[in-house]
Amino acid sequence: MKTSRQTLLLALSLFCAVIAQAQVPKYNSYPSASAVIFLDFDGHTVSGTSWNVSGPIYCGASGLDSTKITTIFNRVSEDFRPFNVNITTDSTKYLAAPLNKRMRVILTVTSDWYGSAGGVAFVSSFTWGDDTPCFIFTALLNYNVKNISEACSHETGHTLGLYHQSTYDGSCNKISDYNYGQGSGEIGWAPIMGVGYYQNLTLWNNGPNSYGCTNYQSDLSVITSINGFGFRTDDHSASFGSATMATFSGNQFNVSGVIEQNTDQDLFRFEQPSYGHFVLDAIPYNVGTGNSGSDLDMQVTLYDATQTQLNVFNPGTLLSSVIDTLLNAGTYYLKLEGKGNMYAPNYASLGSYSLEGNFTAATPLPLRRLELFGELNGDQHILNWLIDADEQIIEMILEYSIDGRTFEPVLSMDESSRNYSYKPVTAGAIQYRLNVTFDNGRQYYSNIITLKSSGKNAGPVLLGNPVISNQVRISSPGIFDYMIYDLSGKVINKGRLNAGLNNLKTSIDAPGMYVIRFSNGGEYWSEKIMRQ
């Protein structure tokens, strides 16, 4: 038996059919690193370690096929991408590494020697230098690739000196030894050292561990300070003067990188050859739809040649980002960062990414300026714009997007309008652009701006006032009844709103003032409608 510092072990809780064992493919995430984490899928006999109180442990193979092995390798590699460590499935890489800078992670169907758990590890065993492994019990995890991957990173984290990320109430009483995270969807988050089975975005964390609500554990600091390795060397400069050149080839460029630390900013420079349409897809590394397996919530900032910020792109409910805009010929810069979101902290949004830029030449604009501006005034979104053109505007639509890709109309504007304000119902970041069509048939979009809504409105909100037709647009947070009156009290229309955007055709034909009243059965809201 080892000393007391070696005897502390922690098991990850659980949540079977046997699958034929495939030949294990050989992969390396960072071959130049001297520190190694070996994912051992093909069985191993463990002897002479702190686990062997009752003799050798004969571990069967993982029961996973090569496709599942590949996905697990990729998921675990991404969790450790910021660090100067090689995740490998090659035993020769493990055996060649220094004894005190390597860990064997045994993925096995054999668990009866230990009991019911997803995995188990000794805390800080990575540096012991005696080949003490940790274990992942694949059959008890139902051969589920996501859960096995989470268990691999979690148990490896224990070997690197980490305890559980836990949750406490306001009185410092422990709610759970495991932090289950929060949220849902693509950006639903949990700590790797909590329970990551049920969330898409699982990250290292800085939070209270299992030894008390004030005992904060900075996972990144622990990993990089006591195990003989640190962060990877930065691959792209944060300086405009040293920005990496992204060169168009066939009107497309492709570049990639890694955000290694939460202070890291990667800058790229590209030359737009002429006026045209520029589209950038900024995608974090993933293993499938919905950016599954990603560890990076991307933010992209676009600058012009004078290093003036043009816009920030960070869709609130997606980990990826997109730019879709018209640019003049010239030099531009892209800044890549990892950011938090409404669920995940900014602490460890780290990992690898790829950028694909596409350019399509366009006919010169029939206008000199088309620019959208916006600001917040409490819960109000204040929007205004400049249009400098010789051609006549025949249609102008203010559009919004929640995901940064799909834009929907807020309302059609009178061609002379240059401002609009309203109070949105939707919480989170909302992107806006102006869609303008001229009398020569050409259609153009303004720049995209982003405003963040608090989403605190209790009732429906009228979009577009005054109105210029008998159609009224209303954004509603739920199901509400409505009635429209004229000033004499006569009911013009009544009906029911659905949650979301509602387009109501009314009998408001004559110009003047009207009142719309909303009700949910117990509360009432009223707004005035100006019909031009």
Image (cartoon, rainbow, N blue to C red):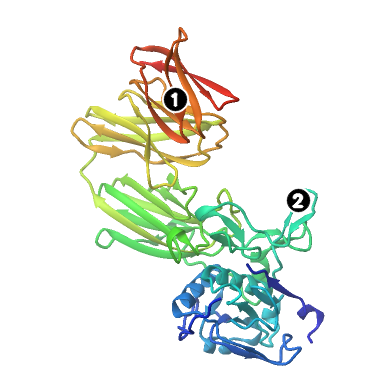
Q: Residue 40, relative to residue 394: is it above or below?
A: below
The quarter holding residue 328 reads: top left
The residue carrying mark 1 is: 495
Q: CA distance from mark 1 to mark 2?
A: 45 Å
Along the viewing direction, whichever of 92 and 510 lies nearer the viewer: 510
Query: Could you tell me which secondary element the residue under label 2 belongs to?
Result: loop
Is the N terminus in the top left, top right, bottom left or bottom right quadrant?
Answer: bottom right
View extreme (top): residue:
488
In the image, what residue type sits under mark 2?
Asp
Measuring 59% from the left and 81% from the top, which residue is drawn there? 109
Q: Secondary structure at mark 1?
A: strand
Callouts 1 and 2 close, C-beta under 8 Å: no
Do we see residue 309 in this rendering? no
Measuring from the top left, give residue 411's x and y in whole percent.
37, 30
Q: Residues within 10 Å of mark 2 (few under 14, many from 20)?
A: few
| Between 2 and 149, the one nearer to me in the picture | 149
Compared to residue 379, the image places residue 154 above or below, namely: below
Q: Residues within 10 Å of mark 1 (few under 14, many from 20)?
A: few
Q: Earlier in the sequence, mark 1 or mark 2?
A: 2
**Residue at image x 65%, y 77%?**
228
Badge 1 amino acid: Gly
Q: Quadrant of residue 51?
A: bottom right
Q: Which mark is residue 169?
A: 2
The answer to whether residue 324 is seen in the rendering is yes
Q: Residue 213 location in percent, x, y?
A: 77, 56
Q: Quick check: 216 left or right of 301?
A: right
Image disc number at residue 472:
none
